[in-house]
Amino acid sequence: MNPMYAAEPFKIKVVEPIKMTTRAERAQYLQEAGYNTFLLRSDQCYIDLLTDSGTTAMSDYQWAGMMLGDEAYAGSKNFIHLQEVVREYYGFKHIVPTHQGRGAENLLSRLCIKPGDTVPGNMYFTTTRAHQELNGAQFVDIIIDEAHDSQAEVPFKGNVDLAKLQKLIDEVGAERIPYVCVAVTVNLAGGQPVSMANLRAVKQLCSQHGIPVMFDATRCVENAYFIQEREDGYAGKTIRAILKEMMSHADGCTMSGKKDCLVNIGGFLCMNDDELYQRATELVVLFEGMPSYGGLAGRDMEAMARGIEESVDQHYISHRVGQCRYLADQLEAAGIPIVKPVGGHAVFLDARAFLDHLPQDEFPAQTLAAQLYLESGVRSMERGIVSAGRNQETGDHHRPKLELVRLTIPRRVYTYAHLDVVARACKDLYARRREIQGMKMVYEPKFLRFFTARFEPLPAPVAAERTEPALAHA
Ligand code: PM9
């Protein structure tokens, strides 16, 4: 028996075949997809680590719940169940279902932001910042500095820097900050958690200034796991208790249920404030649907309610985080640069270090994701300069320090043997990394460009003429 991992806490009832492709086929698919892994077809991918969003394998308990869908237009009993579960597990008074996380972000941003406002957050997330900016706000990053350093081994690397937050409040004034957005965990930092002490302190500081705190609760169960593992006083507490305590430090949250609620579609907006809820019910009918379904079928709400119940199971979450660590350990042992510490939903390759001969303007992470697919059929996602988009005022690229490729582990989908294949592919690619040329962007959409942008490989001579080492761009 391999001592490096604990076996899956589930057995497999339904299987979905996957197939390997040839290198020649993958070269063609990649070209057709504009070298953007988002534009590949799923049946062209052998192991699909594009995202953990909506890719979860639901349990028999959830599928049984799907058959109990009450598809009444108004007042579905599945909404009542979801409301009860959210109140019980998260502790918020009101819930407005939405079709997915960005539906909740749209509502929150429209409800609370006025043009010229500032929204502080612990590192940007693509859709979250896009909605804030669409409503006229400026996003300001208040995460601790270490979060931007892929090698800084900090247990709570997602923490808010309280001094940065205080300084920002002093500079812009509390009345220009509609809310502080705290992501638990921080996706683009590598899935890094926020400590309970930090959540408590952020809430205290914001309360002094009358500023609400809204969580991006998308991966809150993973955050609770890290608190249990790393923070003094929490080792003996259940994930469920830690989760509820975390949420007590927020006035509400947006949630993409497609991650820690273990469903393929769904999300919600929560709040304790009655007046905000009233306004949310007025707005949701324009964008999502009735306040009792918000763009979801009754069966989807039932699956989400049941997924929330299952998500706090200790065996489930230990196995999930364990899978990330299993893959990370293999990569580290081979000397492949990854973000440390390893987060809860993915292993992030450090593309700057992996392809240290490429400058950031040649899209090292986008290139690495494309090459990994070509090498092996493993699909991953760029999380670097392409995802970061452009500065709304200057029009220049945002240039994040972190230039990453995310190997995202879907929940309850792949086995350790699949992860071995991924590790092997990364090792093979690392061995031939010096042969890899950068790319240029040939089509750039205006919003959230990473989804549909297209690229072309640069000809080899351009790279051969380069004199400067790429890390100078860091
Ligand atoms: N995250 C992910 O792959 C989906 C595609 S990339 C935009 O990581 C956070 C922290 C997320 C997130 C989605 C959303 C939006 C909000 N916050 O995709 O709209 O990771 O359900 O959620 C993706 P929806």
Image (tube, grey):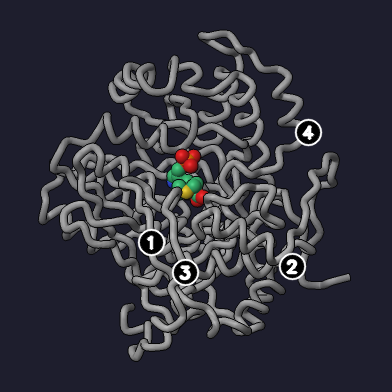
Contact flag, marks 1 and 2 (Cβ < 8 Å): no
Observer-side mark, 1 or 4, equals 1
Which label lies toward us, 4 or 2?
2
User: With respect to residue 24, does 350 lie above or below?
Assistant: below
Position of 431 with respect to 117 (left or right) is right
In the rendered structure, which disc, 4 or 3, sits on the residue that comes first in sequence?
A: 4
Q: Nearer the viewer, residue 71 or 65?
A: 71
Mark 3 or mark 2, which has the lower sequence index? 2
Q: As shown in the figure, which amino acid type bears the numbered disc 2?
A: Val
Rendered view: 398 above or below 133? below
Estimate the spatial distance between the alpha carbons at disc 3 and disc 2, rounded to whole Å. Answer: 26 Å
Quickly name the residue at label 2: 421
* Mark earlier in primary sequence (4, 2): 4
Q: Amino acid at mark 1?
A: Met
Q: Position of residue 17 (x, y in %)?
A: 80, 47
**Viewer-nearest of discs 3 and 2:** 3
Q: Quadrant of residue 174?
A: top left
Q: Label 1 belongs to which residue?
A: 441
Rendered-image quadrant of the N terminus: bottom right
